[in-house]
Image: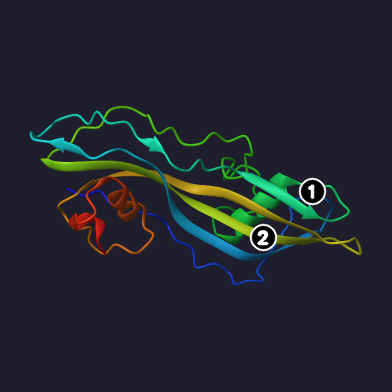
Amino acid sequence: MLAGTAACTSDGDGPTAKATATADSICEDGAYSWFNVDERDVLTGVAEKEKIDRKGARLTHKLTPLHTPRTAVTFEKGSRAGDAKAALRSLAALIGETNADDDGVSTEFTNVHRSAPDLDNGSTTVDGVGTIVQYAWVKQVTADFRYTCGDGKPVTGRATSWVIDGSGLLECSTPIENVKEGAPALAAARLSCDPDAPAAKT
C-alpha cells in the first residue's frame, strides 16, 4: 500500500532567464531576470505511524505540521517600490505555470494572502493492513530576481510560492519504489517509521 508523491516538474529556462512585466508592474516595459530558481517537493505534515489490522479502517492520527508554505516577495534593495503581484506573475510565466500577460490565470500562485493547505481535511480510510503513515507535501518554488526598467536603478529580491499540494500514505514494512533522497515520502518514513524500516531506506 503506497501512495507516493506525484508532482509536475519544470525544465526551467536557465539562470538568466527573463520574463516581461505586466501592465500593472512597476513601470511599462520593465523586465525580470531570474536566477537561483529552486523547485522542490517539501514535506508539510506527517502523522505518527498507525497499526491497521483490518481493511477499510479509518486512520485516526492527525498530521503534525512541519512546514507552512507561503506566497511572498521580498525586495532586498533598489530605489523603487516593488510590485509583488507582478514579480510572482513573472515567476509563474518562467516556470510554465501561466502566461504573464493573462490576468485570469494562476491567481492562487500570485496571491500573497493565500492560505496554507489544510492538513486536517477529513478522515482517510485504507484498503490494506500494516503500519501506516500519512503525510502531506507541496511543490515549493523559490527564486531570486533582478528587476530593471529604463535607466532606473535595478531592484533585486526573492519570490516564493507553491504550485501543487498533495498527500500520501506509506506502509513502513514496504520499500518505497524509485524514491529519491529528499522526497516527502522518504522523509515521512524516516520521521514516523522505525529507523530500520524498509520504507525508511533508499
Tell me the colour scheme of the image.
Answer: rainbow
Q: Position of residue 129 (x, y in %)?
A: 10, 40
Q: Which mark is on residue 6?
A: none
Q: Secondary structure at mark 2?
A: strand
Q: Residue furthest right?
A: 151
Q: Earlier in the sequence, mark 2 or mark 1?
A: 1
Residue at image mark 1: 82
Q: Position of residue 96 (x, y in %)?
A: 54, 58
In the figure, residue 152 lies in which quadrant?
bottom right
Q: Residue at x 78, y 46 (%)?
A: 24
Front residue (pair 172, 21): 172
Q: Position of residue 64 (x, y in %)?
A: 38, 36
Question: Disc 2 marks which amino acid?
Answer: Asp
Q: Position of residue 42 (x, y in %)?
A: 44, 51
Quarter of the C terminus within the rendering: bottom left
Residue at image mark 2: 144
Compared with residue 7, is residue 117 higher up or lower down, i.e. above or below?
Answer: above
Q: Residue furthest front?
A: 195
Q: Secondary structure at mark 1?
A: loop
Front residue (pair 47, 32): 47
Compared with residue 4, is residue 32 higher up or lower down, i.e. above or below?
Answer: below
Question: Disc 1 marks which amino acid?
Answer: Gly
Q: Residue at x 20, y 57 (%)?
A: 196
